């Protein structure tokens, strides 16, 4: 089968397409014919340094989420699962490939009427956005600042916050030149946030963006921090007493540099949610059901063939993507 190999850590170019042995469904497993692969930002960080939540010895096939059709089952697995459309995590590796073998109890059947690409786009991001929204304990009227609001998780957080009755301020950042020539990616991200219903949209590459937020809504009640670093620190400064800063990512390369003592002095809760395996599964099921009902819509901004995984990583790393990025294995 075709797969993408990671043989050393480094830039996107270290991802190399090639051949790999076909996996076989062992006891308690299913074999999935992969149609689409979900890429997350943290995978680009792992590829670069080997750090983050994933682990494995090189060489390896990276990736952690796929969607496709069950082609075979191993011993102890019901035969009627063959032919079922599913999305599934792969345990931290093996996803950038045409086939994967995974435990049968880790797959999520795709609800009837839901497109497979939508389900794949929600596999990781929908779970994360659902977990963060619940952790924030939103109430109607909350002023909610969403960082990276045109990204995979951020665009879902905008929708979930609005559905909870919040007023959403979207902070976005483009990928190309910002001063001088027009920034097409930045303009697309602003348009995306506006189309999702954000009340205010700011570009966090402008030094004066916190003032724009204050002028528009005053203090904010909740920050969904997916960027970290200086952007997160500026967002923290916008929170009022009793506010909640919910962190889910570090696109800048570092978590928010906010001291617990500083937050406590201002009555602000710093929230970095965690969950059990059962809770994570429930969050995924909830996100898929919301999408099937038309209440949640992931934004799929770009697709790349499996053999061009390096190009996909380069685009994500350079902030030249909008919404979710998928690899097409078929």
Image (cartoon, rainbow, N blue to C red):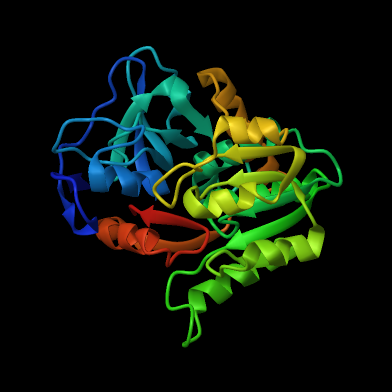
Residue at the (71%, 67%) spot, across then down? 212
Q: Quadrant of residue 270?
A: top right
Q: Nearer the viewer, residue 5 or 186?
A: 186
Quadrant of the frame with the C terminus: bottom left
How many marks are shown on the rendered structure?
Answer: 0
Residue at the (46%, 20%) spot, across then down? 105
Residue at the (29%, 35%) spot, across then down? 93
Image location (x, y in percent) of residue 220? 75, 49
Q: Nearer the viewer, residue 107 or 184?
A: 184
Residue placed furthest toward the top = 76
Residue placed furthest toward the right = 141
Q: Quadrant of residue 22?
A: top left
Left or right position of 179 against 3: right
Q: Quadrant of residue 28?
A: top left
Quadrant of the frame with the N terminus: top left
Image location (x, y in percent) of residue 86? 48, 36
Left or right position of 71 against 205: left
Image location (x, y in percent) of residue 33? 35, 41
Could one spot residue 324 in this view of the protein?
A: yes
Residue at the (53%, 19%) spot, across then down? 276
Residue placed furthest toward the bottom = 181
Image location (x, y in percent) of residue 148? 55, 56
Left or right position of 164 against 222: right
Image height of 32 relative to 35, above or below: above
Q: Nearer the viewer, residue 247 or 302?
A: 247
């Amino acid at each position: 089968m075709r797969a993408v190999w990671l043989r050393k850590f480094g830039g996107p170019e270290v991802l190399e397409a090639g051949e790999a042995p076909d996996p076989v469904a062992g006891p308690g497993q299913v074999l999935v014919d992969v149609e689409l692969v979900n890429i997350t930002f943290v995978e680009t960080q792992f590829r670069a340094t080997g750090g983050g939540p994933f682990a494995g010895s090189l060489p390896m096939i990276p990736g952690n989420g796929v969607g496709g059709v069950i082609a075979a089952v191993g011993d102890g697995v019901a035969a009627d699962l063959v032919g079922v459309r599913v999305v599934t995590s792969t345990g931290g590796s093996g996803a950038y490939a045409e086939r994967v073998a995974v435990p049968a109890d880790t797959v999520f059947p795709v609800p009837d009427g839901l497109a497979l690409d939508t389900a794949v786009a929600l596999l990781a991001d929908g779970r994360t956005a659902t977990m963060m929204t619940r952790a924030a304990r939103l109430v109607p009227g909350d002023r909610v600042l969403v960082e990276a609001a045109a990204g995979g998780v951020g665009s879902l957080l905008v929708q979930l916050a609005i559905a909870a009755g919040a007023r959403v301020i979207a902070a976005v950042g483009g990928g190309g030149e910002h001063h001088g020539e027009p920034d097409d990616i930045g303009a697309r991200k602003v348009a995306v946030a506006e189309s999702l219903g954000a009340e205010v949209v700011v570009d966090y590459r402008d030094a004066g963006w916190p003032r724009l937020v204050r002028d528009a809504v005053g203090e904010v009640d909740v920050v969904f921090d997916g960027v970290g670093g200086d952007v997160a620190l500026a967002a923290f400064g916008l929170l009022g007493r009793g506010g909640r800063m919910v962190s889910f990512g570090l696109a800048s390369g570092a978590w928010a540099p906010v001291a617990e003592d500083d937050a406590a002095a201002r009555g602000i809760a710093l929230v970095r949610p965690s969950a059990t395996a059962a809770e994570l599964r429930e969050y995924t099921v909830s996100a898929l059901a919301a999408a099937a009902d038309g209440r949640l819509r992931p934004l799929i901004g770009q697709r790349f063939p499996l053999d061009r995984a390096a190009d996909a990583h380069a685009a994500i790393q350079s902030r030249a993507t909008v919404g979710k990025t998928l690899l097409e294995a078929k």
